Amino acid sequence: MPIKGLSDVRRLPRAAKIHLGEKKISEKSGKEYPAAVDYFVWPEDYAGELAELFGEKCREIPVMFPVDDREMVAPQ
């Protein structure tokens, strides 16, 4: 069931997620766990292109919003 005023809002599609950590494997248990890093972790599909533009261990990226209206960008 759609939510009036929320479900009918058009949004830009998400191409990928940029992460702030990597998954590592514990030497003791052999289980995978998240580990924070101080740089952005590029998604595999775009890693080559983004690393070429911003570097392998980029700590800062430019951000641009599609519109100037704050309510449209972040309605919360």
Image (tube, rainbow, N blue to C red):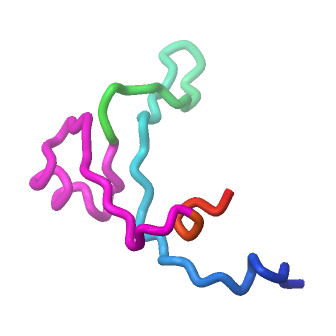
Task: Give above or below for 74 relative to 12.
Answer: above
Towards the viewer: 26 or 2: 2
Towards the viewer: 56 or 24: 56
Towards the viewer: 62 or 41: 62
- x%, y% of residue 56? 17, 41
**Left or right, 40 with reference to 74:** left
**Left or right, 74 with reference to 3:** left
Towards the viewer: 69 or 20: 69
Decide whether residue 58 is among the magenta residues: yes
Quadrant including the C terminus: bottom right
- x%, y% of residue 15? 41, 70
At 38% from the left and 72% from the top, the residue drawn is: 66
Task: Give above or below for 72 relative to 63.
Answer: below
Specify start and end residues of the magenta stretch as a single range: 41-70
- x%, y% of residue 35? 47, 26
Quadrant including the N terminus: bottom right
At 77% from the left and 80% from the top, the residue drawn is: 5
At 46% from the left and 35% from the top, the residue drawn is: 23
